[in-house]
Image: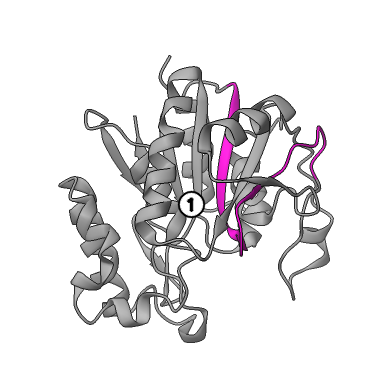
Amino acid sequence: MKMPVLFVGHGSPMNAIEENEYTKKWEEIGREIPKPKGVISISAHWYTDDIFTNNLENPVQIYDMYGFPEELYNFKYPVKGSEKLALRLIETLEEKIKVDNSWGIDHGTWAVLCKIFPKAEIPVVQISLNGSYSIEKHYEIGRKLRKFRDEGYLIFGSGNVVHNLRLLNPNISGYDWAYDFDNYIKINILNRNFKDVINYKNSGESYKKAFFTLEHFLPLIYILGASYDNDNIEIFNESCVLGSLSMTSYLFK
């Protein structure tokens, strides 16, 4: 059975312990999609100078965020890893991918998957984002991952289309430029014009504030690479929060 491919705008790690309109949709997605053999996760929060994966049976849960309530740091998502899947990724990608078990599963992964798969019964293996690669290279890696869908694995990207922490504003949902950029990406995805998503600077002035570094945008590029031309595209959680974060998410199935 062909598995879908999923990009989630993850927003605040507090979503792991809160119930809101976004987390309710994540829970709904978990009930809607077939149960995968495993999850290949590309998180914005493992951004490295090389490309890594992890292969422990019990990957470390990383609390890579600061200044949140103690309850969040006590939250456990005891998901298993998969040495077999990690080896397959190493063999498939041919990108000199290395094993690094010091990182494990970060909040870009567990804060969302704990809602989608709350029983923590599905193995999860992360792949890091190599910051030295071009956007086109990340897209190519997504293309190479695509075959795992046909083997029953869920390819999961976690980031934010708009992610500018310097301009957070709790008094508004989204700045005009944030909605403009989010909409530019949405239209081009719906039209399957992935070239103009990769060339995001074609959006006009809005990209200049959408993000300053690429790590939250790149997981979306993997998901586009892993999509098929005949996939149906479902958009959910289409909105911005705190002025400069997009929660807009995409399910290709």
The boundaries of the magenta stretch are 37-59
What amino acid is at disc 1? Tyr
Give the left or right position of residue 188, taking residue 245 as reference. left
Q: Is residue 193 above or below residue 91?
A: below
Asked if the magenta segment contains residue 38, the reply would be yes
What residue lies at 68% left-to-right and 46% top-to-bottom? 98
161 vs 169, nearest the viewer: 161
In the rendered image, the vertical position of residue 226 relative to residue 96, given as above or below = above
Question: What residue appears at the point 30 percent right and 39 percent down from the top-left corner?
Answer: 234
Q: Which residue is under mark 1? A: 22
Which residue is most to the left?
A: 191
Asked if one can make out residue 164 in the rendered structure from this viewpoint, the answer is yes
On the image, the x and y values in percent for residue 251 come to 37, 39
Position of 50 with respect to 253 (left or right) is right
Quarter where residue 58 is shown: top right
Q: Quadrant of residue 203?
A: bottom left
Q: Secondary structure at mark 1?
A: helix
Classed neighbour count for the residue bearing mark 1: other residues with Cα under 10 Å, few (<14), some (14–19), many (≥20): many
